Amino acid sequence: MKQTYKIILLTILFSTLTACGNKKHDPVLAGQCANSVDLASKTYDVTESSDTAGAAAMTKAYALITAAKFEQTLDNFSKCADKANQALGYIRQVKTEVKAEKK
């Protein structure tokens, strides 16, 4: 019985590794991912928010940047770019609100 479980587990392991190894590397998506993550990382500034809603938005942005970097390491460039762009949306929202408050 234990031998059967070992065979099943090894089969699952090898099929998972094979699926991960067969990913196609799209240089355009990889570039979009890298650029979006870099831009989001450079524009992220938690001290920029002046209220609780802004701090929450910046926390979401930070979590999305972290998730995007994780997807980048897995070569999931489409998901990476999506998450980095969502983070940029939160960052822009906060920066717009801060500018409006200063006027």
Image (cartoon, rainbow, N blue to C red):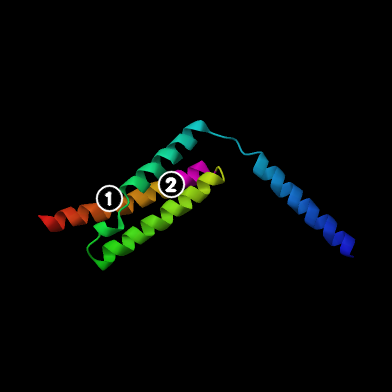
Amino acid found under the numbered disc labelled 1:
Arg
Residue 79 among magenta residues: yes
Mark 1, residue position: 92
Mark 2, residue position: 82
Q: Quadrant of the C terminus?
A: bottom left
Q: What secondary structure is the magenta-colored segment mainly? A: helix
At mark 2, the secondary structure is helix
Q: Tell which of 49 and 93 is nearer to you.
A: 49
Q: Earlier in the sequence, mark 1 or mark 2?
A: 2
Say whether residue 45 is left or right of residue 102.
Answer: right
Image: magenta residue range: 76-82
Query: What residue is at 40 percent from the left and 38 percent from the top?
Result: 35
Whether residues under marks 1 and 2 lie with C-beta atoms below 8 angstroms apart, the answer is: no
Q: Nearer the viewer, mark 1 or mark 2?
A: 1
Q: Tell which of 45 and 15 is nearer to you.
A: 45
Position above or below: 79 against 31: below
Spatial CA span between label 1 and label 2: 15 Å
Query: What residue is at 45 percent from the left and 41 percent from the top?
Result: 33
Residue 25 sits in which quadrant?
top right
Measuring from the top left, give residue 60's x and y in whole percent. 38, 59
At mark 1, the secondary structure is helix
Residue 85 among magenta residues: no
Query: What residue is at 75 percent from the left and 53 percent from the top?
Result: 12
